[in-house]
Image: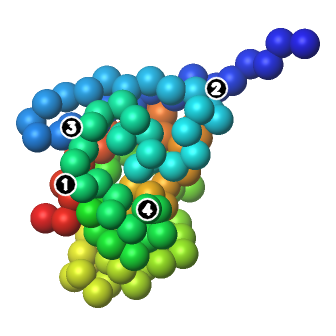
Amino acid sequence: MVITRTSIQFTAWYKGEKYELQTCEGEYRKLMVLLCGKIYIEGFGACKGLGRCDTSLIKAEGLHPALNTLYRNETSTLYKTGILQPNKRIACQIFVDENLKNVTVQVTGNK
């Protein structure tokens, strides 16, 4: 039996450098872990994926409508930190699936 996994390609910007990233569905669960695994980002995701900090903050372009849903603690964390732009998300709250295809993310951290 052959298991076919969906290939996911997207672009990430970090400190002015462009990264063309590729993964497959099931390799990483959350975007924060993928970004840490593919690009070493010091201090990224200080709350370890609980959505309680903004250290894994990203700015996203081309988000699939399914990725516009805020999960768990993300809504209150963004509100408390004054981040109200709809294209700003916390990477630990974004699942890695086909909805990330062709998205561009800029890693901003808590800036």
Query: Spatial distance from mark 3 to mark 1, Cα to Cα?
Result: 9 Å
Q: Is residue 56 left or right of residue 91?
A: left
Total numbered circles: 4
Picture coordinates of residue 37, whole percent (x, y): 40, 35
Name the residue that disc number 4 marks: 48
Spatial CA distance of label 3 from label 4 is: 21 Å
**Three-letter code for the amino acid on which mark 4 is drawn:** Lys
Separation of marks 4 and 2 at Cα, in angstroms: 26 Å
In the foreground, 65 or 70: 70
Instruction: Please say whether residue 14 is visible from this viewpoint.
Output: yes
In the rendering, at what x and y percent does residue 25 appear?
62, 33
Q: CA distance from mark 4 to mark 1?
A: 17 Å
- Mark 4 falls on what kind of element? loop
Residue beneath disc 3: 13
* N-terminal label among 4 and 1: 4
Looking at the picture, which amino acid does disc 3 mark? Trp
Q: Amino acid at mark 1?
A: Thr
Q: Secondary structure at mark 3?
A: strand
* Residue positioned 36% across, 31% down in the render: 38
| Residue of label 1 | 108
Q: Amino acid at mark 2?
A: Thr
Q: Which mark sits nearer the N-terminus, 3 or 4? A: 3
Find residue 79 and report its image quarter: bottom left
Q: Report the mark closest to the observer, 4 or 1.
A: 4
Dot 1: element: loop
Dot 2 alpha-carbon crowd within 10 angstroms: few under 14, some 14 to 19, many 20 or more:
few
- Give the mark, 4 or 2, whose residue is nearer the N terminus: 2
From the image, tell me which residue sits under label 2. 6
